[in-house]
Amino acid sequence: MKKIVIIGSGIGGLVAANLFAKKGYNVTLFESHSTPGGYTAGFKKKGFYFESGTLAFEASPSVFKAMKQLGIYKKLTFVKKTTQRWISQDFDTLLKSYTQFKEVLYNSYPAYKEQLKSYFTCLDPVYKIILLFIKKPMPHLLNPLSRIINNLSILLKLKKIISIFKTYANVNILEMAVRFFPIGSNPFNLLATSGYSKMGFTSLAGMMTMFEDYWTIKQGMQMWADVLADNFKKLGGELKLNSYVEKIVTKNKQVIGVICKDKLYKTDIVISACDYKKTFLKLLDNKDLIPIQLQQKIAQAPVSEPFFTVYLGLHIPNQKLLQKLKNPSVYFFNTSEYIDFDNNNDETIFEKSPLMLFSGSLINPLLAPEGKSSLMIQSMCPVGWMNNWGGGDKTAYKKLKQKVKTTLIKRTENIIPGLHDYIEFEDAATPLTYERYTHNSFGASSAWSWNPHKRFYENPRSDNTITPIENLYICSCWTNQIGGVPGALSGAYKTLRNIRRK
């Protein structure tokens, strides 16, 4: 059976490793970090557990089916997170449904009721279509007959689906907000900045499905990665931790192996489950194998916005923290002004950016020491903010990191008064931290840009696992325009299908 090397043990790499090992391939999985998981991982400090990056995932029918196929579903406890607390200058509510979200906006902005109705007349049909898709497993997880039966309801509505997506495929949330609301008005600021910067209108509809389908792992995301890694090893696969792949080696225009720690590992196939840009612009030994226009496109293609995360261990019981937060997940919006995340020179952006708060210990008290609790504070960042966090100057970097951390903690005190006094442990991760651990360019949190005007793939729904290099494949979230756990999962299954077809 053919030898396969997989670079990167995020969800895409781990699932691919399991799939290929299960089929009898000789698989070696290389991971540069000391633990598997990539963004879907976590860590412990002074008894407090924190998620590294990914806090939750959607497309549960696909995820659950994949985990059952791999035989690990029962080893994890999946927790549904379909209620979140949303706060702004205009509302403070526990949201449980898309319908309730609309009602909150109608009640908060009565002067804009007619404009909101017109806006939701556009958003509602897109939301319903996306809901139709996420309630079913991805086609790649099904055999041909099951695929047809499972997607019959979609096939019957195909003409309408195509029409609606064609209408909004190239429209972003800023452009839609401009259509219906005065620029600078509170509903404009909210709807133009919810989610990734200038993300597609269809992606906003997809984001709203979190009220129906949004999950986390009770034991923490690291447990998910560990279970997948252990299962892979039981299937006969080899996991090499602390093993950064330095080069993808080619000969006669095809892959022949990888170099790690100055040693050549010969292989028949290389699957890159890591950053797309670095795969071709840094790891590949012969850039001439990539057409110059494609090289330029890869280099210039914008990525999704990264995050700055504050990790706090608190000497406050979970029950008391819950009284203040009211929910493990809190979204804190600033509706008083429009925030432009394309401006990476805005020094004040963290003083007004939307915040996401998450406490894993409120879902599982075992993720913090007894009588204590954990809290994560996240803010999206402009890509390359402030000369990419100091332009390589360590002193400037540390000052920026400390300033942002202090700012986010202070702002969170609007929700948790006296937060600073409860802090027992604190740390922070900048986009450069995430890039160091995941190797994602600029610390990108979810592959390519979500702005439909900045797409890398001309057809986001095409199969993007195949590369111009013979026997080199991509199976990470970068195979999809907007990535995420579903994108990584899809990439793994598509890669399996493409390799087995050869």
Image (cartoon, helix red, strand yellow):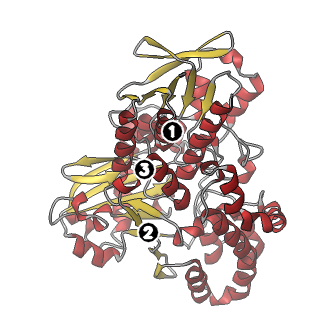
Distance (Cα) linking label 3 and label 1: 24 Å
Which residue carries the number 1 mark?
19
Residue, x 67% and y 89% (percent of image)? 111
Residue 352 shows in this picture? yes
Residue 402 shows in this picture? no
Tell which of 20 and 161 is nearer to you: 20
The three-letter amino acid code for the residue at tag 2 is Lys
Q: Secondary structure at mark 1?
A: helix
Q: Earlier in the sequence, mark 3 or mark 1?
A: 1
* Quadrant assignment for the C terminus: top right
Looking at the rendered image, the disc whose residue lies closer to the viewer, 2 or 1, is: 1
Q: Secondary structure at mark 3?
A: loop
Image coordinates for residue 215, horizontal then vertical, percent: 45, 63
- Crowd class of label 2 (few under 14; some 14 to 19; many from 20; radius 10 Å): many
- Crowd class of label 3 (few under 14; some 14 to 19; many from 20; radius 10 Å): many
Looking at the rendered image, the disc whose residue lies closer to the viewer, 3 or 2, is: 2
Which residue carries the number 3 mark?
53
Residue, x 42% and y 70% (percent of image)? 330
The residue lying furthest to the front in this view is 145
Query: What mark, if any, has residue 81 been given in the picture?
Result: 2
> In which quadrant of the rendered view does residue 493 lie?
top right
Tell which of 1 and 223 is nearer to you: 1
The three-letter amino acid code for the residue at tag 3 is Gly
Image coordinates for residue 309, horizontal then vertical, percent: 39, 52
Image coordinates for residue 453, horizontal then vertical, percent: 75, 50
- Please tell me whether residue 59 is drawn above or below residue 344 in the rendered image: below
The three-letter amino acid code for the residue at tag 1 is Leu
Image coordinates for residue 337, horizontal then vertical, percent: 58, 69
Judged left or right of residue 317, residue 140 is right
Q: Earlier in the sequence, mark 3 or mark 2?
A: 3
Distance (Cα) linking label 2 and label 1: 28 Å
Tell which of 441 and 347 is nearer to you: 441
